[in-house]
Image: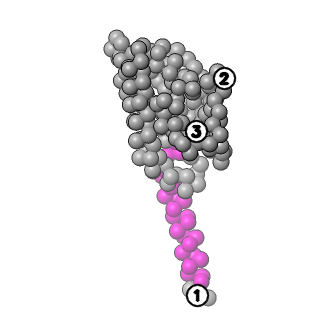
Amino acid sequence: MRFIKLIFISVIFLSLFLTAFSLLFPPHLHIARNVNIVSSEQKILSVISDLHTWNSWNKFISDASLTNKTISENGNILQSDQLQIFIKKDSSNSIEILWKQPNKKTFSGGFKLMEINPGTITVQWYFDFTFKWYPWEKFSSLVYDKQLQPEIEESLTNLKQLVENNP
Protein backbone atom coordinates (compact mmCIF):
# COMPACT_ATOMS: atom_id res chain seq x y z
CA MET A 1 0.00 0.00 0.00
CA ARG A 2 2.84 2.33 0.83
CA PHE A 3 4.45 1.66 -2.54
CA ILE A 4 1.22 2.45 -4.42
CA LYS A 5 0.83 5.66 -2.44
CA LEU A 6 4.41 6.67 -3.32
CA ILE A 7 3.80 6.00 -7.02
CA PHE A 8 0.54 7.97 -6.96
CA ILE A 9 2.15 10.99 -5.25
CA SER A 10 5.13 10.80 -7.62
CA VAL A 11 2.89 10.82 -10.69
CA ILE A 12 0.94 13.80 -9.38
CA PHE A 13 4.14 15.68 -8.51
CA LEU A 14 5.69 14.92 -11.92
CA SER A 15 2.51 16.05 -13.71
CA LEU A 16 2.43 19.30 -11.77
CA PHE A 17 6.14 19.87 -12.42
CA LEU A 18 5.77 19.28 -16.18
CA THR A 19 2.73 21.56 -16.34
CA ALA A 20 4.54 24.32 -14.44
CA PHE A 21 7.65 23.91 -16.61
CA SER A 22 5.57 24.06 -19.81
CA LEU A 23 4.17 27.43 -18.70
CA LEU A 24 7.65 28.86 -19.35
CA PHE A 25 7.15 28.25 -23.08
CA PRO A 26 5.41 31.02 -25.02
CA PRO A 27 1.86 30.32 -26.22
CA HIS A 28 2.69 31.57 -29.75
CA LEU A 29 5.23 30.40 -32.31
CA HIS A 30 6.16 32.26 -35.49
CA ILE A 31 8.15 30.40 -38.17
CA ALA A 32 9.33 32.29 -41.24
CA ARG A 33 11.64 31.64 -44.18
CA ASN A 34 12.60 33.95 -47.06
CA VAL A 35 13.72 33.65 -50.65
CA ASN A 36 14.75 36.31 -53.18
CA ILE A 37 13.10 35.99 -56.59
CA VAL A 38 14.02 37.99 -59.68
CA SER A 39 10.58 38.73 -61.07
CA SER A 40 7.67 41.12 -60.76
CA GLU A 41 5.51 41.26 -57.65
CA GLN A 42 2.35 40.66 -59.70
CA LYS A 43 3.71 37.46 -61.23
CA ILE A 44 4.74 36.07 -57.85
CA LEU A 45 1.38 37.01 -56.33
CA SER A 46 -0.48 35.32 -59.18
CA VAL A 47 1.40 32.06 -58.53
CA ILE A 48 1.06 32.00 -54.73
CA SER A 49 -2.52 33.28 -54.58
CA ASP A 50 -3.90 30.53 -56.85
CA LEU A 51 -4.05 27.13 -55.15
CA HIS A 52 -4.18 25.47 -58.60
CA THR A 53 -0.46 26.29 -59.02
CA TRP A 54 0.59 25.01 -55.60
CA ASN A 55 0.97 21.41 -56.82
CA SER A 56 3.92 22.49 -58.95
CA TRP A 57 5.96 24.04 -56.13
CA ASN A 58 4.46 23.49 -52.64
CA LYS A 59 5.67 20.34 -50.86
CA PHE A 60 2.76 20.38 -48.39
CA ILE A 61 0.16 20.23 -51.17
CA SER A 62 1.95 17.99 -53.67
CA ASP A 63 2.19 15.31 -50.97
CA ALA A 64 0.61 12.09 -52.17
CA SER A 65 -0.87 11.46 -48.73
CA LEU A 66 -3.53 14.15 -49.28
CA THR A 67 -6.60 12.21 -50.41
CA ASN A 68 -9.77 13.50 -52.08
CA LYS A 69 -8.09 16.81 -52.84
CA THR A 70 -10.32 19.43 -54.48
CA ILE A 71 -9.61 23.07 -55.24
CA SER A 72 -12.35 25.66 -55.66
CA GLU A 73 -12.93 27.15 -59.09
CA ASN A 74 -11.45 30.52 -58.15
CA GLY A 75 -8.43 28.84 -56.56
CA ASN A 76 -8.73 30.15 -53.02
CA ILE A 77 -9.98 27.05 -51.15
CA LEU A 78 -8.40 23.61 -51.03
CA GLN A 79 -10.10 20.72 -49.28
CA SER A 80 -8.88 17.20 -48.65
CA ASP A 81 -9.47 14.53 -46.04
CA GLN A 82 -6.36 15.66 -44.13
CA LEU A 83 -6.28 19.43 -44.62
CA GLN A 84 -8.28 22.51 -45.59
CA ILE A 85 -6.65 25.71 -46.82
CA PHE A 86 -8.42 29.05 -47.16
CA ILE A 87 -6.88 32.18 -48.62
CA LYS A 88 -8.36 34.74 -46.22
CA LYS A 89 -6.98 38.03 -47.44
CA ASP A 90 -5.36 39.04 -50.66
CA SER A 91 -3.84 42.52 -50.49
CA SER A 92 -1.37 44.25 -52.77
CA ASN A 93 1.74 42.67 -51.26
CA SER A 94 0.62 39.95 -48.85
CA ILE A 95 -1.56 36.89 -48.68
CA GLU A 96 -2.96 35.42 -45.47
CA ILE A 97 -3.85 31.76 -45.34
CA LEU A 98 -5.83 29.74 -42.81
CA TRP A 99 -4.92 26.06 -42.44
CA LYS A 100 -7.37 23.64 -40.79
CA GLN A 101 -6.76 20.04 -39.86
CA PRO A 102 -9.54 17.48 -39.32
CA ASN A 103 -8.82 17.41 -35.57
CA LYS A 104 -10.05 21.05 -35.47
CA LYS A 105 -6.53 22.46 -35.10
CA THR A 106 -6.15 25.67 -37.02
CA PHE A 107 -3.17 27.86 -37.67
CA SER A 108 -2.52 30.84 -39.84
CA GLY A 109 0.23 31.74 -42.19
CA GLY A 110 0.87 33.54 -45.36
CA PHE A 111 3.24 35.32 -47.66
CA LYS A 112 4.67 38.81 -47.54
CA LEU A 113 6.39 40.31 -50.57
CA MET A 114 8.97 43.10 -50.26
CA GLU A 115 10.93 44.69 -53.08
CA ILE A 116 14.55 45.04 -51.95
CA ASN A 117 16.08 46.02 -55.28
CA PRO A 118 14.36 46.88 -58.55
CA GLY A 119 13.30 43.55 -60.06
CA THR A 120 14.15 41.48 -56.98
CA ILE A 121 11.35 40.52 -54.61
CA THR A 122 11.86 38.93 -51.21
CA VAL A 123 9.10 36.43 -50.50
CA GLN A 124 8.59 35.59 -46.84
CA TRP A 125 6.53 32.51 -46.02
CA TYR A 126 5.41 32.37 -42.41
CA PHE A 127 3.33 30.23 -40.08
CA ASP A 128 1.79 31.37 -36.79
CA PHE A 129 0.82 28.77 -34.20
CA THR A 130 -1.10 29.33 -30.97
CA PHE A 131 -0.88 26.72 -28.24
CA LYS A 132 -3.15 26.01 -25.32
CA TRP A 133 -1.72 25.64 -21.83
CA TYR A 134 -1.58 21.84 -22.11
CA PRO A 135 1.99 20.59 -21.58
CA TRP A 136 1.92 18.27 -24.60
CA GLU A 137 0.98 21.18 -26.87
CA LYS A 138 3.69 23.42 -25.47
CA PHE A 139 6.34 20.71 -25.75
CA SER A 140 5.26 19.93 -29.33
CA SER A 141 6.20 23.49 -30.25
CA LEU A 142 9.85 22.53 -29.75
CA VAL A 143 9.87 20.37 -32.88
CA TYR A 144 7.69 22.47 -35.20
CA ASP A 145 10.53 24.58 -36.59
CA LYS A 146 12.80 21.61 -37.24
CA GLN A 147 9.93 19.63 -38.71
CA LEU A 148 8.67 22.35 -41.08
CA GLN A 149 11.99 23.95 -42.10
CA PRO A 150 13.02 21.48 -44.85
CA GLU A 151 9.58 21.47 -46.47
CA ILE A 152 9.29 25.27 -46.41
CA GLU A 153 12.77 25.83 -47.81
CA GLU A 154 12.35 23.25 -50.57
CA SER A 155 8.96 24.74 -51.49
CA LEU A 156 10.42 28.25 -51.66
CA THR A 157 13.25 26.99 -53.86
CA ASN A 158 10.68 25.34 -56.14
CA LEU A 159 8.67 28.58 -56.22
CA LYS A 160 11.77 30.56 -57.19
CA GLN A 161 12.60 28.14 -60.01
CA LEU A 162 8.99 28.10 -61.25
CA VAL A 163 8.67 31.89 -61.37
CA GLU A 164 12.15 32.67 -62.74
CA ASN A 165 12.06 29.92 -65.40
CA ASN A 166 8.62 30.91 -66.74
CA PRO A 167 8.78 34.56 -67.74
Q: What amino acid is labelled 2 in the image?
A: Glu
Q: Residue furthest top?
A: 118
Q: Is disc 1 placed on a helix, strand or loop?
A: helix
Tags 2 and 3 in contact by the CB under 8 Å rule? no
Rate crowding at label 1 as few (under 14), some (14 to 19) or many (20 or more) other CA atoms within 10 Å: few
Residue 107 marker? 3
Say which of marks 2 and 3 sits in front.
Answer: 2
Residue receiving disc 1: 2
Residue 73 marker? 2
Please give the range of residues in magenta.
Answer: 4-28
Tags 2 and 1 in contact by the CB under 8 Å rule? no
- Would residue 147 appear left or right of 11 to someone viewing this image? left
Q: What amino acid is labelled 1 in the image?
A: Arg
Q: Is disc 2 placed on a helix, strand or loop?
A: loop
Residue 128 or 157: which is nearer the viewer? 157
Choose the circle earlier in sequence order: 2 or 1.
Answer: 1
Say which of marks 3 and 1 sits in front.
Answer: 3
The Cα–Cα distance between marks 3 and 1, rounded to whole angstroms, is 47 Å
**Residue 127, percent from left and from top:** 50, 36
- Residue 13 against residue 105 in the figure, above or below: below
**Residue 6, percent from left and from top:** 56, 81
